[in-house]
Image: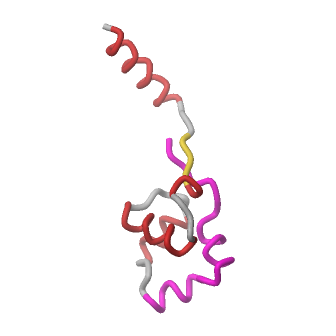
Amino acid sequence: MIKYKRNIIDMMAKKGVTTYIIRKNKIFTESQLQQLRNDRLVTQETLDKLCTILECQPGYLLEYLPDENTKDFEEKVLTYIKN
């Protein structure tokens, strides 16, 4: 599972980019802001804008954490590769 490492809205606010500024300048849609508030993953285009605003690489924002579904999937893939 891919998750955010940090609170994106807070990070933008610390850079001086508040939700008011985002709305006023139409940087993100309300739907995109809601996704960020709810820690839901966004499109590559939105991620690109976030990296520009925060002056960072995607790896600074995102992390990969295996979950149960992923572990089952990995076992199936490894079994397939070995055969």
Would you identify the image quadrant in which residue 79 lies?
top left
In the image: residue 42, left or right of residue 56: left
x and y, in percent, of residue 41 in the image: 46, 57
Above or below — where is 76 with respect to 50? above
Above or below — where is 78 with respect to 34? above
Please state, as top left, top right, bottom left or bottom right, where the C terminus lies in the image: top left
* Observer-nearest of 59 and 79: 59
Above or below — where is 40 with respect to 55? above
Residue 19 included in the magenta stretch of the image: yes
Residue extending furthest toward the top: 83
x and y, in percent, of residue 16 in the image: 64, 84
Query: Colour scheme of this structure image?
Result: secondary structure
Would you identify the image quadrant in which residue 15 lies?
bottom right
Residue at point 48% right, 92% down? 24
The stretch in magenta equals 1-25
Residue extending furthest toward the bottom: 24
In the image: residue 70, left or right of residue 14: left
Residue at point 61% right, 75% down? 12
Residue 16 included in the magenta stretch of the image: yes
Residue at point 44% right, 18% down? 75
Residue at point 49% right, 25% down? 71
x and y, in percent, of residue 54 in the image: 57, 71
Numbered marks: total: 0
x and y, in percent, of residue 21 in the image: 54, 88
